[in-house]
Amino acid sequence: MSNRTRKNRYELRKKYRRRRLIAFFSTLIILLVALFVGISWWATKEKVAEPVTPKATAKKEPKQVEKPKQPEQTKEIVRNQEIDNYLKQIGFSGTAVVVREGNTVLNKGYREANRITHVKNTPDTVYYIGSAQKAFIATAILQLEEKGKVKVTDSVQKYLPEFKAHITLNDLLHHTSGLVGHTEENAATTPKALVADIIKQGTKRGPGKWDYLDSNYTVLAYLVEKLSGESLSEYLKENIFKPAGMKRVGFYQTFKKRKKGLQWATI
């Protein structure tokens, strides 16, 4: 046998061995993959077959709605017994606040705020401020002047053409307008109707002489609403009360339903 023949046979055997090895390892890999897949499938089946025990659901307690915090009551302060005794002696009814050099000497309510229900006066009792509201209205007019919406030296006719008298806003501010004033009635009305009545009543003299009259500030309050585009109460709240930190102050209006809508009674 020649060398070439022997070499060919050797190469053939080598090739067959290689093929057998490849076939063996391929079969082994397939078996391993099949085994892995089978185990995974069996585990999944067992998991699904397990009885599911429902978990005890905890009862949800209803959420407690937080009540709005009530403002803290101001404590009574009496650091001067003589003043306290004097106010009791004269029968003073109301709330007295005395501050000296930055220190509160007295802050206490006396007697009853309502003698029918016997509600006592306290340091937190709210009172009608009466004509002190004029200071707020004057402040509003001056604020509007700073914003360029009005001048206190202007005639009222510039903003209310139906106003026949030659009166300036300064005359209204200083009670020197000479107006007769609106008709005094204890009835519901509107700011527009009040001003209309003031215009109708006219003047009793030319401007210049001091004569204290609520109607002067009725016209100014109406101008605040007209020039700002807001109700007087809303304007005072946003532009004076809030910036000044006045938390215990408001604007009182009594509304009554009428055929023509809501009207407010002047107090």
Image: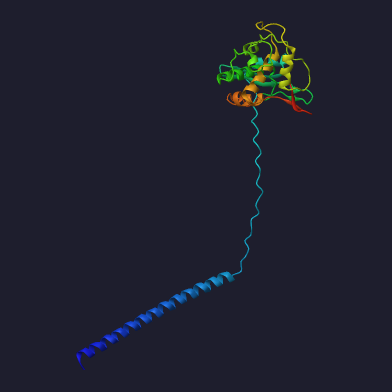
Can residue 233 be spotted in the picture? yes
Please state which of residues 74 and 175 is positioned toward the viewer in this rendering: 175
> At 41% across and 77% down in the image, what residue appears?
29
Location of residue 119 by image quarter: top right
The quadrant the C terminus occupies is top right
Can residue 267 be spotted in the picture? no
Question: Where in the figure is residue 49, as x and y percent of width and height?
Answer: 59, 71
> At 20% across and 92% down in the image, what residue appears?
2
Question: Where in the figure is residue 105, as x and y percent of width and height?
Answer: 61, 18
Please state which of residues 207 and 84 is positioned toward the viewer in this rendering: 207
The residue at the far left in this view is 3
Horizontally, residue 183 falls left or right of residue 169, namely right
Location of residue 59 by image quarter: bottom right
Please state which of residues 12 and 43 is positioned toward the viewer in this rendering: 12
The residue at the far bottom in this view is 1
The quadrant the N terminus occupies is bottom left
Please state which of residues 101 and 49 is positioned toward the viewer in this rendering: 49
Horizontally, residue 73 falls left or right of residue 46, namely right
> At 23% across and 87% down in the image, what residue appears?
7
